[in-house]
Amino acid sequence: MEWLDTFWSTYSTLVLTVGTNILLALSIYLTLACGLLTVANAAFMGIGAYTSALLTIHADSPFLLVLSCGALLPALVALVIGHPTLRLSGVYLAMATLAFGEVVRIVVLNSEETTGGALGLNGIPQRTSGFDVALAVGLALYVLLRLASSRVGRTMIAISQDEVATELMGINVRAYKLFVFVFGAALAGLAGAFNAHLTFFISPSEYGFERGVEILTMGVLGGTGSPWGAVLGGLLITILPELLRGLGHYRPIVNGMILIVIILYSPRGLWYLVRWARRLAQPAR
Amino acid sequence: MRLTQIVRGTMLALVVMVGTSGAAEIKIGAAEALTGNASQYGVPIRRGFELALSEINGSGGINGDKLALIVEDEQGKKEEAINVFKKLIFQDRVLLLFGPTLSNSAQASDPVAQAAKVVVFGTSNTADGITSIGNYVFRNSVTEADILPVTLKIAGQKTGFKKVAVLYGNDDIFTKSGYDNFRKALRELKVPVTTTETFAKGDVDFKPQLTKIKASNADAIVLSALVAEGAPIMAQARQLGITLPFIGGNGMNSPRVFELAKDYSDNLWVGSPWSVENPASENKRFIAAYQKSHGALPDQFAAQAYDAMYITAQALKRIKFTGKLEADRSALRDALPVVQWSGATGAFKFRQITGRDGKPAGYDAVQTAIVMSTKDNRYVIQK
Amino acid sequence: MLAQQFVNAISLGGVYALFALGFTLVFGVLNVLNLAHGAVFMLGAYAALQGVVLFRLPILAAIVLAMVVTALAGWALDRMIFATLRARQAPHLAPMIATIGVAITLTSVVEGLFGAENLRFPIQMLPSEAVNLGGAQITSLELKIILLAFALMALLLWGLKKTRIGCALRALAESPKAAALLGVNVEGLFSATSIVAALFGGMAGVLIALYSNAVFPHMGQPMLHKGIAVVILGGMGDIRGALLGGFFLGFAEVFSVAYVGSTMRDAVAFGLLFAVLLLRPEGLFGKAAQRRA
C-alpha cells in the first residue's frame, strides 16, 4: 500500500492531466466526426479555466458550481460565434477559429485588472480530485458513445461525408453543426476548469496556438472514428513525454518522430490500428 | 533450485552492502529547463550548480559526506515542472530542490514543495508572488523591485535624463513584472513617461515601436526585456538613428548582449548583484573556474546558481542528520534562513516576507545592486 | 515618422509575403496545411548562418547553401511523408499532423545541435550604411531584401503563368485526377511544388535572420502564425493573394503600432482576419467556390 501512496504522490498530476486531455480530445473528436475542423477548443479551454478560477478566487463558490460555469460560459460564447463562423467550411473554418482563439488570448492578456494579464492568475486552490475527473470523463465518454451509435451520430457522419446531400435529405445541417460546436466548447471549458484547479496557476500563453495544435494532434492521432480514439490520443500524448524522460536531451526529438511514425503507418489514427489488430485476432469465420 | 536462490540472495546482499557502505550521500535535486526555449537559462544554471558541487565535494563535502545532485529537465513547462518536482520529492526523496527556471513554472510547482514540506530554492525566479507561497520557498535571485529603483537613480544621475519612453514585453511574466516595477519606481522618482510601447516574445521587428519612441522625444528608453529581444531592439534602435541610453532590467545583464548587438551595445545601463567585472576575489575565482570548464564567460544565472549551492551547503553543515526524511527536511528549512554568505554575487543574506494572508512566508534575497553601463563591449561599473 | 513607418511596413510586408508564398503553394497544390513551414524557414536561417560561420562562405554562397538545404528538406518532406500518405489514401488531416511531428523534430534537432540561445551573423557580413529616403532611414540591406522579395515573387508569378510547368501546376491545383489523365507527371510536380515552397520559406528565413540579426530554434513559430494570417487574408491557395496579403498584414501591424498602440497590435491583425473571414471568407482574392473534400 505504501507503493500505491508513493505512486499517487508522484504521479497524481499526470493521471489527472490524462483525464483532462481525454476531455479535450473528446471535444475535438466531436467536431471532427462532423467534418468540422475547429481549432478554437484551446480558447474555450482558456475561457473555462479563467471563469472557474476567478469564481473560486473571488467568490469561493462550491466546486460543482465553478465547474458548471466553466463549461457553460464557453458554450455560450460558442453559440454566439458559431452562427456566423460555421457558415465557413474546411480550412476556412479552421482559420477563423484560429483567429478567434488568438483574439481571446489577446483580450485576456490585456485585461489585467480581471485576469492578471501576462502575470496570470496564481494561488488557485487545488480542488480537482481523481474522482471528479474520472466521473466527468466517464460521463462524457458514455454520452458520446451513445451518441455515436445513435441516429444523431450517423447523421453527423453523413454531414462529414457530404454536406449537400445530407441537407437535401431534409436534415438541418446548421443545427447539428452548432450543437456539436457548442457541446465541444462545453467539454473543453470543463477540461480548462479542471486544469486550472490542478496546477495552482494559469496564464494566457497556455491557451494559444500550441495548445490548439496539441488538442488537434490528440484527436487525429487517436483516430476520429470513435470516442475511444480520443481516449487513446489523450492518453498517448500525455504519457509519452513521461515515458521518454530517460532520453534526456533526445526526448523532444523522439517525441516528434513517434508522432510522424504513428501517423505515417496508421493515418486513420491509433484507434484504427487497435480495431485492425482486434479483427486479426478473431478466428477466421 | 535452492542453491541458485542462495547464490542470488547472497549476491543481492553483497550489492546492497557495497552500495550503502562508504560515505553517506546527501541527495538534493534540481529541476531546470534543459531543453526548450528556456534552456538558454537552464543550462548555465545547471553548470553553476555542478561547478559549486564539485568544489564542495573536492574540499571535504558536508562534514565528510558527499553531496549528490539529481538534475531533471522540466522543459520550461509548468506541468512538467510539477511532475518533476513530485518525482524528486516522492521518488528520489531529496532533502531540498532547486529551481524551476521560469517564474511561470515556479507559480505552479512551488506550492507542491510547500505542501510536501520540502525547501524549494529558486535561483532564477524574480517575479512577484513566488516567495509569498509559503515558508519553504526560498530564492537568492534578487527581485526587480529591489534593483530597478537603484538602477534608475544612478543612471539618471549619470546621463541626466528628464523624461523616458518605456518598452516592454507584455506577454511574458518576467518582462511584464519588470515593467510593473519600473513603472512604480519611475512614479516614485517623479520621472514623466513620454510613451509606453510593447512587443511580444519571439518578435524580430521592433522598428514600428522604436520609430514611435523616437518621435516622442524621450531622453532615455527604459527596456524590460530578455537579451533575446533586447539585443535586436538595441541594434535596430541604433540603425534608426536613436542614440539614447537604454536602461534595462535583470534580463539585459548578460555578456551575450555584446555578441548579439555587436557595435550597437554601448550605452546600456543595468543593475544586478552580479557583474562579470566585479573584482572581488570570490567572483574572480568563480569566473576563472567556469571559463576553464566551459570555455566561456559565465552569466548571472550561473553565478546565482553557484552561490545558491554554497549557501545550501552552509546550512547542511549545521544540521544533524537523523536519517528520517521529514525531520531532516524540516531541520534544513530551519537552518537556511540564518545563512550569510559571500560568494560570486557578493554578500548575501535572506529576508523573510509576509504572505498574502499576512503571515510570515518565504525568503527573498538581500544583496546590493551594482549598476553598470556598457562601453566598448564591456560592462563598466558605475559608482 | 510616417515615411519611416511606411518603409518599415514595406520591409516587414515583403518578408511576410515571401513566407506566405511557400505556405500557400503547398496548400493550393498539395492540399496540405504545412505546419512544418516555420521549421523550414528556421532551417534556411541556420543553414546560411552555419555556411558563414563554419564554412566561412561569403554571404551569397551561404544563401545558396540555404536554398540547397531547404530544397532538400522540401523534397524529403514530399517524398517521405506526403507521398506515403497519398498512397495510403490518408484522411486529409493526417499530413498536417505529420508536419507537426516534423516541425517538432526539426526544431529539437537544431536546438540540440546549436542551443536555444539567439545566434547572429558576424557583423561584417551585414552592410549597414543607411540611406535616407525622404526622412526615413533604411539600410541598404533592407532595400536589398525588399527588392529580392519582389523579384522572387515576380519570378514565381511569371513562371506560373507563362511556363509549361506553371500551367501544369495550376491544372494540378484544380484537379489532380484531370491533370493525371492529361499526362501530367503528378507525383513529380507535387515534389517540385514542395521543393519550391521550401525554397521560398528558407529564403524568407535567411532574409529575416539578416534583417533582425536573430537566429533561434523557435523563430519559425511566430512566423507561422503570421503566415496563416496572411494566407487567410489573401485567400488560401492564391499566389497574388499571398503577396498582397503579406503587405496588407505588414501595413496593418506597423500602423496599428504607430497609431493605435503596440499592445493591441496582434489584436488588430487577428480581429481584421476574423472580420475578413466572416464577411468574405475566400479572402481578398480567393475563389468563391468551395473546395471539395
Image (cartoon, coloured by chain):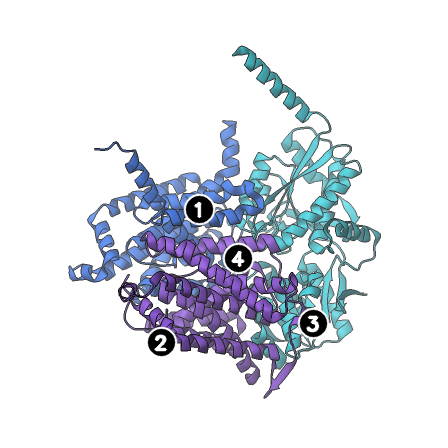
- Cα–Cα span, label 3 and label 4: 34 Å
Q: Residue at x 59, y 88 (%)?
A: C134
Chain letter corresponding to the colour cyan: B
Q: Chain of mark 1?
A: A
Residue C250 in the image: x percent, y percent? 49, 75
- Cα–Cα span, label 1 and label 2: 38 Å
| In this rendering, position of residue A230 left or right of residue C205 | left
Chain letter corresponding to the colour purple: C
Residue density around tag 2, few if under 14, some if 14–19, many if 20 or more, within 10 Å: many
Q: Which residue is mark 1?
A: A237
Are both tags, 2 and 4, on one chain?
Answer: no
Q: Which residue is mark 2?
A: C285
Residue B101 in the image: x percent, y percent? 62, 51
Task: Examine the image and state in which quarter residue C135 appears.
Answer: bottom right
Chain letter corresponding to the colour blue: A
Mark 1 element type: helix
Task: Examine the image and state in which quarter residue A173 appears.
Answer: bottom left
Of tags 3 and 4, the one toward the viewer is: 3
Question: Is any part of residue C270 visible from this angle?
Answer: no
Q: Nearer the viewer, residue B241 or B272?
A: B241
Q: Give the numbered dot on residue A120.
A: 4
Q: Chain of mark 2?
A: C
- Cα–Cα span, label 2 and label 4: 40 Å
Q: Nearer the viewer, residue B324 or C144?
A: C144
The three-letter amino acid code for the residue at tag 4 is Gly
The three-letter amino acid code for the residue at tag 3 is Tyr
The residue furthest bottom is C134
Q: Which residue is mark 3?
A: B264
The three-letter amino acid code for the residue at tag 2 is Phe
Question: Is any part of residue C181 visible from this angle?
Answer: yes
Q: Chain of mark 4?
A: A
